[in-house]
Amino acid sequence: MAERQKIDARGAFCPGPLMELIAALKLSSIGEEIDIWSSDKGSASDIPAWCAKVGHQVVETSEHEGYWSVVVRKAK
Amino acid sequence: MSSKPLYLMLCSGEHEKIQLAAMVASVAAVSDRPVEVFVTMNAVLAFERGKIPAERYQGGHFHEMFKTANVPDAVELFGQGKMLGELKMWACSMVLDLKHWECETHLTEDLFDGPMGLAKFLADAEMGELITI
């Protein structure tokens, strides 16, 4: 299994974390997973909503101290 | 299912309004929604070639916070929307005429698709949803 890529976007404001995720997905292969860390409160709901809209898969979302981790699998 | 295109008319030169326009346009574009932005009036001044971010934007309650916090630069957001989605930007031909400006020489590089008249933009916008900021 390929290593999961991590993007630390903590400190970036909306829509910075989402845009960083999208840029990374463009460069990834189908099936690869990206774990994006964001301290922007909206990301925890924005990123899953974006994935549902465009057809990528959210593997898990978890809240940590001061930030959220959202793992996304490239599906197309 | 493809989304209805979004047409955004940006006329304010206020920082927070340009920021909002950039956020709406870029997020819509990367969400598989075609976006066309018509930049006119004071807003055109923010896109003058050679300006640094500190010179581009003026006014609005959040102006100082945007500058000091790690908020994405509006011009860069428009650029990301173009790079990662289907986003076109048009500069108002009337404003360009008044300023004696050309897109290719006076506006931010690699951002504008060309000049456009209001009538053409409004006619195109009948195919989608129009927002004015």
Image (cartoon, coloured by chain):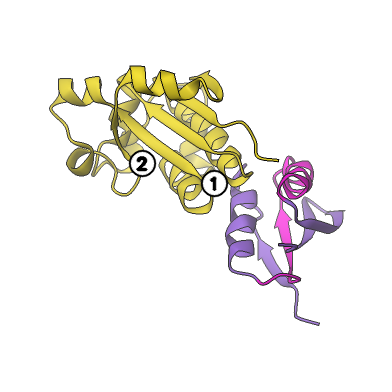
Chain colours: A purple, B yellow
The percent position of residue B9, horizontal first and vertical second, equals 44, 22
Mark 2, secondary structure of its residue: helix
Please, what is the three-letter code of the amino acid marked with disc 2? Pro
Q: Name the residue under label 1.
A: B70
Q: Residue at x 35, y 38 (%)?
A: B54
A17 inside magenta stretch = no
Q: Name the residue under label 2.
A: B53
The percent position of residue B90, horizontal first and vertical second, equals 35, 33
Tell me the subunit letter for badge 2: B
Q: Which of A18 and B72 is in front in this view?
A: A18
Please, what is the three-letter code of the amino acid marked with disc 1? Asn
Q: Nearer the viewer, residue B98 or A18?
A: B98
A37 inside magenta stretch = yes
**Quarter where residue B93 is shown:** top left
The percent position of residue B66, horizontal first and vertical second, equals 50, 36
Tell me the subunit letter for badge 1: B
Q: Which residue is drawn at 30% across and 22% down?
A: B117
Q: Which residue is drawn at 53% across and 24% down?
A: B127
Mark 1, secondary structure of its residue: loop
Indicate left or right for B130 with A62 as reference. Answer: left
Q: Distance between the residues labelled 1 and 2?
A: 13 Å
Q: Nearer the viewer, residue B53 or B104?
A: B104
- Whether residue B10 is visible to the viewer of this picture, yes or no, is no
Q: Residue at x 33, y 22 (%)?
A: B40
- Closer to the N terminus: mark 1 or mark 2? 2
- Seen in the picture, residue B70 relative to B97 is either above or below; the reply is below
Which class describes the residues within 10 Å of circle 2: few (<14), some (14-19), or many (20+)?
Answer: some
Q: Give the range drawn in magenta.
A: A29-54
Q: Do labels 1 and 2 share a chain?
A: yes
Indicate left or right for B59 with B28 as reference. Answer: left
